[in-house]
Image (cartoon, grey):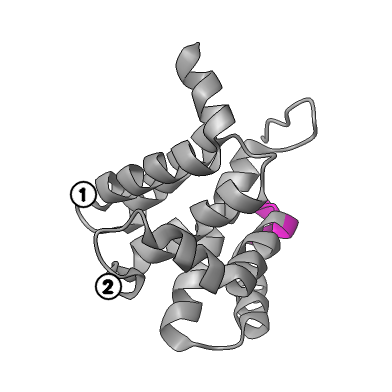
Amino acid sequence: MSRHRADGIDPVARSRSRRRALQALYAWQVARAPIASVIAEFQHEQDMEIADLAYFEDLVRGVEQQCAELDARLAGFLDRGVEAVDPIERAILRIAAYELLHRLDIPYRVVINEAIESAKRFGADNGHTYVNGVLDKAAAQWRAAEAGAARSR
């Protein structure tokens, strides 16, 4: 049973959408297939009725369309080139960067927490620590007012 918030958003479905987007973007990174075919394959093969399909598509298309910008913006927070980051963590960071920069309706703490949980579930050992460190620094800069307000509470 899903729990919709007052604004009609189902946080559980959104989490599932992020996980599906991570899997789709990982496949896109590895196969370099056109994003439309990756989305179509996931819509066909994955259990998308339990996810927020519109949010899944926004994340996947947004990361694909903004990939160069996201990588450039993330570069200042990485200790290596973006292509040297583990492919799973790279996809997680791209999704979170997209949300932090382009989905201001999602609180930065939700973005970071979802990314950490994805890294724990799908990433390398301690990959979640790396993801957390990068995104904490990014959020402090990209969402300074929101992060500052949260810290002053």
Q: Position of residue 115 (x, y in %)?
A: 43, 47
What residue sits 27% from the left and 72% below the top? Answer: 84
Residue 92 shows up from this direction? no
What amino acid type should be assigned to the residue bearing mark 1? Asn
Disc 1: CA contacts within 10 A as few (<14), some (14-19) or many (>=20): few
Please state if 28 lies on the left or on the right of 99 as rendered: left
Above or below residue 123? Residue 151 is above
| Nearer to us: label 2 or label 1 | 2
Q: Position of residue 122 (x, y in %)?
A: 34, 57
Q: Position of residue 79 (x, y in %)?
A: 24, 59
Q: Is residue 123 magenta?
A: no
What residue sits 44% from the left and 72% below the top? Answer: 26
Disc 2: CA contacts within 10 A as few (<14), some (14-19) or many (>=20): few
Cβ–Cβ below 8 Å for labels 2 and 1?
Answer: no
Pointer 1: what residue?
A: 126
Q: Nearer the viewer, residue 66 or 55?
A: 66
Residue 64's image quarter? Answer: bottom right
Q: Residue furthest top?
A: 153
Q: Which mark is residue 84?
A: 2
Q: Secondary structure at mark 2?
A: helix
User: Which contiguous range is marked in magenta?
Assistant: 48-54
Please state if 39 lies on the left or on the right of 144 as rendered: right
Q: Main secondary structure of the magenta part?
A: helix
